[in-house]
Image (cartoon, rainbow, N blue to C red):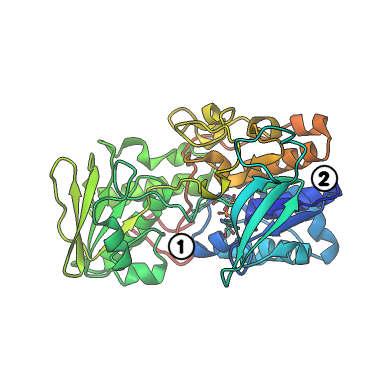
Amino acid sequence: MARLPVAVIGAGPQGLAAAAHLLERDIEPVVLEAGMKPAAAVREWGHVRMFSAWDELVDAAAARLLAPTGWTAPQGGYPTGQQWIDAYLAPLAAALGERIHYGARVSGVSRRGRDRLVSADRDGQPFVIHVMDRDGTESRFEVSAVIDASGTWYQPNPVGADGLPAIGEREAATAGVLSYAPPTAVQAAAFAGKHVVIVGSGHSAMTAVIEVAAVAQRNQGTRLTWVMRRGEVGNAFGGGAADALPQRGALGQRAREAVDAGLVELATGFRTEGVRLVDDTAVLVAEDGRQLPAAEHVVALTGFRPDLSFLTEMRLDLDPVLQAPVKLAPEIDPNVHSCGSVPPHGAQELAHPETGLYLVGMKSYGRAPTFLAMTGYEQVRSVAAELAGDYDSARRVGLVLPETGVCSGGGLSADAELTLSGNASPQ
Ligand SMILES: Cc1cc2nc3c(=O)[nH]c(=O)nc-3n(C[C@H](O)[C@H](O)[C@H](O)COP(=O)(O)OP(=O)(O)OC[C@H]3O[C@@H](n4cnc5c(N)ncnc54)[C@H](O)[C@@H]3O)c2cc1C
């Protein structure tokens, strides 16, 4: 078993960092990435400016791996997702070289010769990974441990308030009237003169509200409705000036300004149950019978959930509410904690009854929206130490996180402008 590699699922920021930590421990990683390039998920929101500064976005082991290549850590400022890739994640992937397999979607994880029911000598068996390549060919191979860093980006929550796709939601998405990603500046500009509905109350929703409000300000006849389940907009605006991540705080302030300036119509307490397609528009219908005016586009930014479909044969210990590891769940419950009050944690908190399997990074938070990259870097450091048998180091977790706010989603697109008041220009 010890001679087998460790599988890392996903070549996103956390999977790549995990591979760097494993290498430092003389453990060979095999990284399986569904996309054709590293950080495929970050690439999809690459136009968004992040609320974390550069020094919070680079993993220490990754930096050590990159140092001999002549790479220098970017300094100061807040990158966009694409800049994060160009200046750090892509060079890191290049340094890991052929250890990363692209176009390799993990479709199943199990134990050799044992399904979930079989306990006999279970921990003594290698894991079996099933991989689907781009042309649909399936293969399987054995590894000694599994670090699942596959994120949650490809599993957006639906607009249906009950967590299921609203009646008609799938049809609206197929028709292209409803989408699940923050609009690029170009997409937002195309909303001029139209009615756009944005659903959600996290930072991604706020980002989109600010973008589209700026379009509405410049183009008369543009209508923007912001839909949220909560009865009051209240703390949706986050930590504001008190936020220890200034970019994140600024986002909430600017969303508030857009609302105060009358550019946004709020539909609070709106629990969507249906999306009716009328010609080329969508009409959102609430459980209480309210209907919104027909919109040319609906942007659903209602958070994410983990894809557990390829882990059906694994013995997981997940919190029934958040779908995060049970020991971690109380520490990240968004009703109680902001990302700043999440205590550092590692292999111990991330362990499952399935010895040798760890869910890390964004996926480890299940449905909680408070994940920060720096939290994940400490997770993967600890997990690599645990797999190497350095239990002292694995348990010695330490990390100081910024306080306040709710840390999901990012900042504005690189070229977004909003000049609702003198102090509202992008920072
Ligand atoms: C708009 C936005 C802005 C954000 N801004 C910040 C910020 O400022 N600061 C911050 O700390 N965090 C921010 N985040 C959170 C951010 O997502 C994470 O910090 C980071 O991307 C999580 O990394 P990850 O590796 O866990 O997941 P991901 O980045 O989602 O990477 C997962 C990888 O796994 C691959 N994958 C998925 N399924 C499979 C499979 N079955 N088989 C093989 N590969 C698979 C994907 O293609 C992807 O490459 C932001 C998130 C969003 C959406």
Identity of the residue drawn at 58% across and 41% down: 364
Residue 124 at x, y = what percent?
A: 78, 37
**381 up-or-down from 104: above or below:** above
The amino acid on which the numbered mark 1 sits, given as a three-letter code, is Ser
**366 up-or-down from 138: above or below:** above
The amino acid on which the numbered mark 2 sits, given as a three-letter code, is Met
Residue 46 at x, y = what percent?
A: 52, 64
> Can you see residue 278?
yes
Helix, strand or loop for disc 1: loop
Return the mark for residue 413: 1
Closer to the camera in the image, 153 or 320: 320
Question: How many residues crowd mark 2 within 10 Å: few (<14), some (14–19), many (20+)?
Answer: few
Identity of the residue drawn at 29% across and 37% down: 230
> Marks 2 and 1, how far apart in space?
46 Å
Q: Which residue is mark 2?
A: 1
Residue 36 at x, y = what percent?
A: 61, 69
